[in-house]
């Protein structure tokens, strides 16, 4: 199996298993990844997902060998485009790399080791948070081969790091190490080599321990506010928060009973 899912303590661990090709994604693997995250979205036993690659690399992007086979089989660019197409009203649409077009209601954390490049970088950008090992790296390496960013890279990267940094990475295709990634906001944590998965799982368990309705409403508001005017963004924030007031009152009661005082988690 190219994708494995394990659920423990409210956390879904999604593992990409194609170590022989640095976890590059072919069509079957893309479908499996998409299915895994759709299942996570609908699973009441899981509140947070951790996404990582086995064998020392997160993901080296689209499997170019599979692309070469399509060329050899006479698959036309138009036929390829048609197979990857989607519409604005599509429900849970698959992306070329799998889950990149999904809008989940729950957070996903990327545990990044080794290479997270090209489409693999786009998968990491799709996640809410990125925990990166000190010798891991990002990069739009597909620049060398004329493969476009069609899994959200041109959309999410500027929103994370700003347009100037994003264009630098998109136009040059250069390697971006962990130190620079942390500095420009491309990752959220840097940990020693071999520790990204453990750190991401610990972070996921911390997040899963919070009251989830409010957490998801606040997350959804932050994601939806991009590009909105202040008034519309505030109205959307209120609509999401209003539905969580019962949870807020229960939390206030716990506080009054002595829980969570002095910043205790």
Image (cartoon, rainbow, N blue to C red):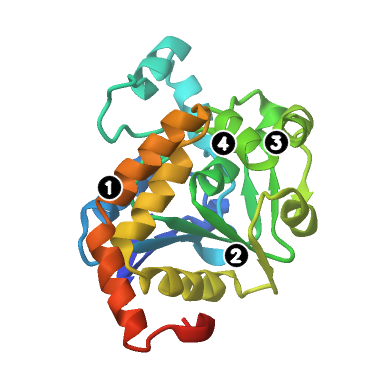
Q: Name the residue located 34 percent from the left edge and 21 percent from the top edge.
A: 86
Residue matched to label 2: 56
CA separation in Å, label 4 and label 3: 10 Å
Foreground label between 4 and 3: 3
The answer to whether residue 12 is seen in the rendering is yes
Q: Name the residue located 50 percent from the left edge and 52 percent from the top edge.
A: 128
Nearer to me, 20 or 237: 237
**Residue 238 numbered mark, or none:** none
Q: Quick one: label 3 or label 1, which is nearer the N terminus?
A: 1
Left or right of residue 143: residue 251: left
Q: Quick one: label 2 or label 3, which is nearer the N terminus?
A: 2
- The secondary structure type at the circle numbered 4 is helix
CA separation in Å, label 4 and label 2: 25 Å
Residue matched to label 3: 162
Residue 70 position by quadrant:
top left
CA separation in Å, label 4 and label 1: 20 Å
């Amino acid at each position: 199996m190219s994708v494995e899912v394990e659920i423990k303590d409210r956390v879904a661990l999604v593992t990409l298993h194609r170590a022989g090709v640095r976890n590059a994604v072919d069509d079957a693997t893309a479908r499996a990844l998409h299915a895994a995250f759709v299942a996570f979205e609908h699973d009441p036993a899981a509140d947070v997902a951790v996404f990582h690659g086995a064998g020392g690399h997160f993901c080296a992007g689209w499997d170019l060998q599979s692309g070469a086979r399509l060329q050899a089989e006479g698959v036309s660019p138009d036929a390829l485009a048609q197979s990857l197409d989607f519409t604005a009203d599509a429900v849970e649409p698959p992306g070329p790399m799998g889950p990149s077009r999904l809008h989940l209601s729950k957070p996903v954390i990327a545990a990044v080791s080794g290479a997270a490049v090209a489409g693999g970088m786009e998968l990491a950008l799709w996640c809410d948070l990125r925990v990166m090992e000190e010798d891991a790296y990002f990069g739009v390496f597909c620049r060398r081969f004329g493969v476009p960013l069609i899994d959200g890279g041109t959309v999410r990267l500027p929103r994370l790091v700003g347009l100037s940094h994003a264009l630098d990475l998109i136009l040059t295709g250069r390697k971006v190490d962990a130190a620079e990634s942390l500095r420009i906001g491309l990752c959220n944590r840097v940990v020693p080599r071999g520790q990204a998965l453990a750190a991401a799982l610990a972070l996921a368990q911390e997040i899963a321990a919070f009251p989830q309705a409010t957490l998801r409403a606040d997350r959804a508001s932050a994601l939806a506010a991009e590009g909105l005017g202040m008034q519309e963004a505030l109205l959307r924030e209120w609509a999401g928060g209003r539905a969580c007031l019962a949870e807020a009152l229960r939390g206030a009661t716990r506080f009054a009973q002595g829980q969570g005082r002095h910043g205790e988690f």
